[in-house]
Image (tube, rainbow, N blue to C red):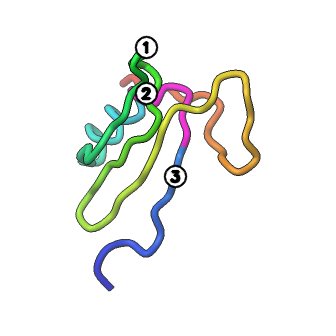
Amino acid sequence: MPGSPVIPGLRYADAPAAIAFLCSAFGFEVRASYEDQDDPTIVHHAELVLGDGMIMLGTRARGRTNRYIAGPPRANWGA
């Protein structure tokens, strides 16, 4: 079956850093990224592709929780 039948959606406290890490560490490429006009550190939606697979991600809502979206509380993206 070509492509991925499941496309995960992830939320990160620092989505731009997560995007940079995923591209650098695993070779993902950014297909689309929609940042907030007033705050470019907020990513409303991004699509990263690797081969036939894709993941979607964005910035976790600050100060709010969503029971349908989970993400790591903190991650160290630096080397």
The three-letter code of the residue at mark 2 reads: Trp
Check the image and report above or below for 22 versus 49.
above
Q: Which residues are magenta?
A: 11-16
* Residues packed near mark 1 inside 10 Å, few (<14), some (14 to 19) or many (20 plus): few
Quadrant in the picture for the C terminus: top left
* Residue 35 percent location from the top left of the image: 39, 28
Q: Residues within 10 Å of mark 3 (few under 14, many from 20)?
A: some
User: Mark 3: which amino acid?
Assistant: Gly
Vertical order, 6 against 15 (above or below): below
Foreground disc of the pair 3, 2? 3
- Provide the secondary structure element on which disc 1 rests: loop
Residue 68, placed above or below residue 71:
below
The first of marks 2 and 1 along the sequence is 1
Q: Which residue position is annotated with label 2?
A: 77
Give the foreground label among 3 and 1: 1
**Residue indicated by mark 1:** 38
Residue 9: image tag: 3
